Image: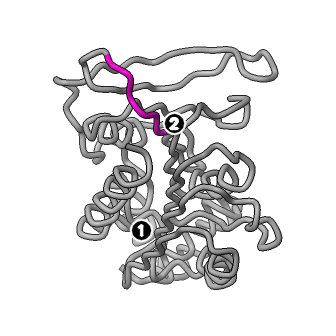
């Protein structure tokens, strides 16, 4: 697919453009209404495509709790079926909210031996338990970076194609960081070098991976035009290895 179309869709979902402007520009790129409408289902997320991680050996549940503003909040929780004390990992969703794909990622973390929780909003949690790690995607990746800045007790943070914190705040980071970037993601990558330079300058433990030729959201298997199986599997294995090193 024409990279300009994928870039346009990324602009629509993150800026965002209005639906009217997005469709107008899509029609111009594809050459007509019929072509645009045939491409549209390939661009839009379809959670029926999400890889389903079986939960036979897991305990899973949806929970509700009071947020910092006393509003009812929700989260999806998964852990190994055997009751035990498990290191916690927060899975932070993209800007589209808690969905089938993020729940699937939560089960993947649980299968690796963690108590994984995916809140449908992070801000009202009010604190982070000791020896916890987090992994976030897109908006959640930016939140992982912000948690690293603002929560000194955080042990490990993984950010998938997430916006970087202010360089001036990098010195506050105590957690080990693992950063995953898509080679074609110009919007997010614009801040990458300054962030990495600041991490080096402040002697912060970090790993940085750039996956050439893949797009923003390459880990999301419910987004067929951007998902890249090889990069997604490699990045997830690196994430689990990283958590194993810094959390267990």
Question: Mark 2 or mark 1: which is in front?
Answer: 2
Q: Which residue is mark 2?
A: 98
What colour scheme was applied to this rendering of the protein? one colour
Residue 4 placed where, x, y %? 50, 83
Name the image quarter holding residue 52.
Answer: top left
Give the residue displayed 70% in from the left and 54% down from the top. 146
Q: Nearer the viewer, residue 170 or 67?
A: 170
Q: Residues within 10 Å of mark 2 (few under 14, many from 20)?
A: some
Q: Is residue 45 left or right of residue 138?
A: left
Residue 197 placed where, x, y %? 65, 84
Looking at the rendered structure, the secondary structure element under dot 2 is loop
Q: Residues within 10 Å of mark 1 (few under 14, many from 20)?
A: few
Q: Nearer the viewer, residue 35 or 198?
A: 198
Q: Is residue 62 left or right of residue 240?
A: right
Image mark for residue 34: 1
Residue 98 placed where, x, y %? 51, 36
Magenta highlight on residue 105: no
Magenta highlight on residue 88: yes
- Magenta-tinted stretch: 84-89
Number of disc labels: 2
Image mark for residue 188: none
């Amino acid at each position: 697919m024409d990279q300009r179309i994928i870039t346009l869709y990324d602009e629509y979902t993150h800026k965002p453009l209005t639906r009217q402007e997005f469709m107008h520009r899509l029609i111009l790129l594809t050459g007509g209404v019929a072509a645009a409408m045939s491409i549209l289902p390939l661009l839009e997320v379809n959670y029926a495509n999400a890889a389903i991680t079986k939960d036979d050996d897991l305990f899973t549940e949806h929970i509700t709790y009071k947020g910092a503003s006393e509003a009812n909040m929700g989260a999806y929780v998964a852990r190994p079926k055997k009751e035990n004390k498990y290191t916690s990992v927060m899975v932070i969703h993209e800007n589209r909210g808690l969905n089938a794909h993020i729940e699937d990622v939560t089960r993947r973390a649980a299968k690796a031996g963690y108590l994984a929780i995916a809140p449908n909003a992070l801000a009202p949690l009010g604190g982070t338990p000791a020896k916890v790690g987090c992994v976030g995607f897109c908006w959640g990746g930016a939140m992982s970076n912000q948690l690293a800045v603002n929560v000194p007790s955080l042990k490990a943070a993984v950010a998938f194609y997430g916006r970087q914190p202010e360089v001036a705040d990098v010195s506050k980071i105590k957690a080990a960081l693992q950063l995953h970037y898509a080679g074609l993601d110009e919007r997010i990558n614009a801040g990458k070098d300054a962030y990495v330079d600041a991490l080096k300058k402040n002697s912060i433990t970090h790993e940085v991976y750039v996956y050439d030729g893949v797009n923003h959201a390459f880990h999301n298997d419910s987004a067929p035009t951007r998902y890249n199986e090889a990069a997604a599997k490699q990045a997830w294995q690196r994430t689990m290895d990283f958590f194993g090193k810094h959390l267990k």
